[in-house]
Image (cartoon, rainbow, N blue to C red):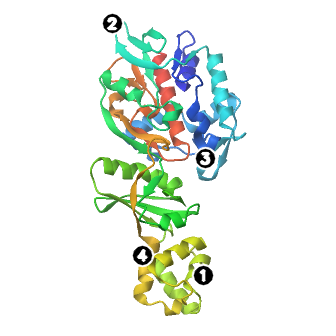
Amino acid sequence: MATAIFTRRLAPGLRVVLLEGARAPGAKILVSGGSRCNVTNAVVTERDFWGGPSTIVRRVLRAFTVEETVSLFREIGVPLHEEPGGKLFPDSNRSRDVLAALLRELTVSGAALLAGYRVQAIDRTGQGFAVATSHGTIEAARVVIATGGQSLPKSGSNGAGYSFAQQLGHSLVATTPGLVPLTMNEASRFHAQLSGVSHPADVAVWIDERIGMRLTGSLLWTHFGISGPVALNASRHWGRAKQDGRGASISVNVYPGLAFEDIDRHLTSLARARPRLAIETALATGSGDVHALPASVARAVLLGLGLPGETPLAQLARDDRRLLVRALTERPLAVSGTRGYNYAEVTAGGVALTEIDPSTMESRVCRGLYLVGEVLDVDGRIGGFNFQWAWSSARAAARGLSR
């Protein structure tokens, strides 16, 4: 949709037809951001994305900046406001308003929307392309694949774009669910007893027994495992390592920014200052630079170690104290998998980014073919970054199409 709008703005004389498989377009916009649509982020750089080369991502992002995105949405009647983490949402907090504005602008631009036209194949012809749809074949001089990935298939993202790109000569980086909740082994009841509890945490993704990625954010314990921003961001790294046949595991530190030595020193000092203070109370109240843990988390950790919560700090043996600190700062999680594409917000992997021209998004292997958005091997962290990738890549493609 964005590519069609931008193209008509840059080249009003160009005939643009948007083929939409669903009868009602924009399903993914409607469900994004808890139905509020996190349009972009206040600060977006190539460091917010994973997948293809960051140098290419940077070039594409420059095609349409955050400032230009904010200006565009204000222009079409959707002013944005900033929330914690730099997330930019519509002032109305309604994703329906974002979709309605884009559809209005699509009409104003003069692009034609054919809803219910599911693309079945794209073949190269002497003059361009033959696009086979559920309502017959359409001839086109140039084609843009903007089909999304495989995440949230109920929204229409069924991965067909990957097949079309491969048939036209592109290679594919194997795909995995991204920004998806992680499941844990049922034998580990730690997560289940904390279902619904959220708190800040550091998450380390271990790959072949070495830390491959450290992430910080809010962690949400669920009946099936873990979710929340930090778990969603970690999911693609765990999933990619697993897919590659490498050893992958995850550990959690409930005191983000603090290490084993910091917490050990804190508890030792607290024991001297307040020897009668119960362990559970100490963990649940915090002091100084050490924040308080949710009481349920403190209780669950102690229960798992067999340490009575009412034990005074001064009576906690050194070995038990260090065991406790280890469980708080380096707790391994029995992650067994992800909740899959049905719950994933993005797809990691896709068409190799090196096979497109970042200044125009045109294919380097099939002239006249353009690829934008999630179908490419680029996935951003949670916070509006994937939408910004969509706007920026769409604008870059429009520049190429208007030439």
Cβ atoms under marks 2 and 1 closer than 8 Å = no
Mark 2 vs mark 3, CA separation in Å: 46 Å
Of tags 2 and 3, the one toward the viewer is 2
Task: In the displayed orientation, state which residue is furthest to the top.
Answer: 127
Mark 4 vs mark 3, CA separation in Å: 34 Å
Say the numbered circle drawn on residue 126.
2
As drawn, 263 above or below 339: below
Earlier sequence position, callout 2 versus callout 3: 3
Of tags 3 and 1, the one toward the viewer is 1
Mark 2 vs mark 1, CA separation in Å: 76 Å
- The residue at which mark 3 appears reads as 87
Q: Amino acid at mark 1?
A: Thr
Q: Secondary structure at mark 3?
A: strand
Question: Residue 64: x and y, percent?
Answer: 53, 32
Q: Secondary structure at mark 1?
A: helix
Q: Amino acid at mark 2?
A: Gly
Cβ atoms under marks 4 and 3 closer than 8 Å = no
